[in-house]
Image (spheres, rainbow, N blue to C red):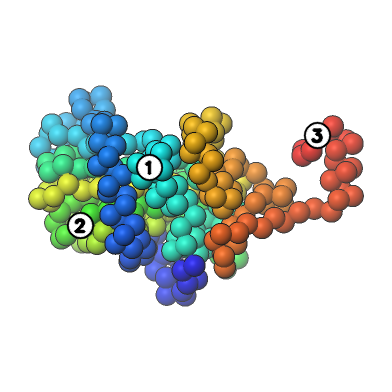
Amino acid sequence: MGPPMSETEKYLFDLHGYLIVRGALSEAEVAEANAAITASAALLLERKGAALRNTPRRAGEYMGGDGETGRQELGEVLNLPADRGGRCFRRLLAHPALVPYLHEVVGPGYRLDHMPLVIQNPRGSEGFSLHGGTVGADGTFNPDLAYQWSHGKMYNALVAVSVALTDVGPGDGGFVVIPGSHKSNYPTPAALIDGLENVGDALVQPTLRAGDAIIFSEGTVHGAAAWRGEHERRLALYRFAPACRAYGRAYLEDWKMGAEAQEDLTDAERAVLAPPFANRLERPQLDPEDVTTTRIEGRSEAKKAWDKQVYRAEYF
């Protein structure tokens, strides 16, 4: 298990709205994930055409790239068979290096909220216009993505984990973020969203080594610059929510996972895939000190028996 989130890391996440965990995945794990993507190359789909672009045609080269090349996406990573590397993507649901951070920024009983996604960017492919934010485009509070601080603790409605599977050098493009924007009281200006306004150092493109993980609040304004690196960019993107919250709804269809993939899950990974409900209603939670085990905060047997009489069901 990785170490608990340090006081410095908590400070930086609260200050910036994101944090980079260096070396979250080992070289062997990165190689395993890349081999799995290569073996599943036929499943990668390219976003082509104006209707599917993540940046409008009017977007500048910084966001829009060459105007034609789209990013490639693979959304079936949880369902990949073990002999094609699927285990490595299921492992990321409860990875020992990430669980302490997710316990801190999302909370005990954290759950997968969106289907995970592998993104591959060839040179010249478009980025993604800036999005997210605690304040919506109309200037009102956005509780679905919000970052909040209350009574000595941070609360995030939705948190993303982007795991770099290739290096990202200075000026290569990829993930960009406006540090501190999770605390902004104003909506993001339209010209800035599409990369049409130069704000200098206010927009940051972190440099990464393969295996680094960016953990960020969806309340932090972020996006992607067009990819200008000589090599293809690859990453795995996961979104997590607190035990009681749901933005996505893939859990209603069991994450579209086949029987083979479901049988391959550990108890800890299965707990992260549970639908939204409160910890006190006997939700399985990962033990932050031992990621291989789960724990349950239960109610008394007498109260559970009473509820069963009242509701004619195991849980209300």
Q: Residue at x 38, y 35 (%)?
A: 76
Is any atom of residue 177 visible in this view?
A: no
Q: Which residue is drawn at 39% across and 57% down?
A: 215
Please tell me whether mark 3 or mark 1 is closer to you in this view. 1
The numbered mark, 3 or 1, whose residue comes first in the sequence reads 1
According to the picture, the residue beneath numbered tag 1 turns out to be 83
Q: Tell me the element at label 1.
A: helix
In the rendered view, tell whether residue 26 sits above or below residue 313: below
Pointer 3 local density, CA inside 10 Å: few below 14, some 14–19, many at least 20: few
| Residue 35 screen position, x and y as percent | 27, 47
Q: Distance between the residues labelled 3 and 2?
A: 52 Å
Cβ atoms at labels 3 and 1 below 8 Å apart: no
Q: Which of 103 and 270 is in front in this view?
A: 270
Q: Which residue is drawn at 27% across and 49% down?
A: 34
Please tell me whether mark 1 or mark 2 is closer to you in this view. 1
The numbered mark, 3 or 2, whose residue comes first in the sequence reads 2
What type is the residue that disc 1 sits on? Asp
Numbered mark located on residue 170 in the image: none
Cβ atoms at labels 3 and 2 below 8 Å apart: no
| Residue 112 screen position, x and y as percent | 50, 45
Q: Quadrant of residue 163?
A: bottom left
Q: Distance between the residues labelled 1 and 2?
A: 29 Å
Q: Quadrant of residue 212?
A: bottom left
| Residue 304 screen position, x and y as percent | 84, 46
Q: Tell me the element at label 2.
A: loop
What type is the residue that disc 3 sits on? Ala
According to the picture, the residue beneath numbered tag 3 turns out to be 313
| Residue 279 screen position, x and y as percent | 67, 52
What type is the residue that disc 2 sits on? Val
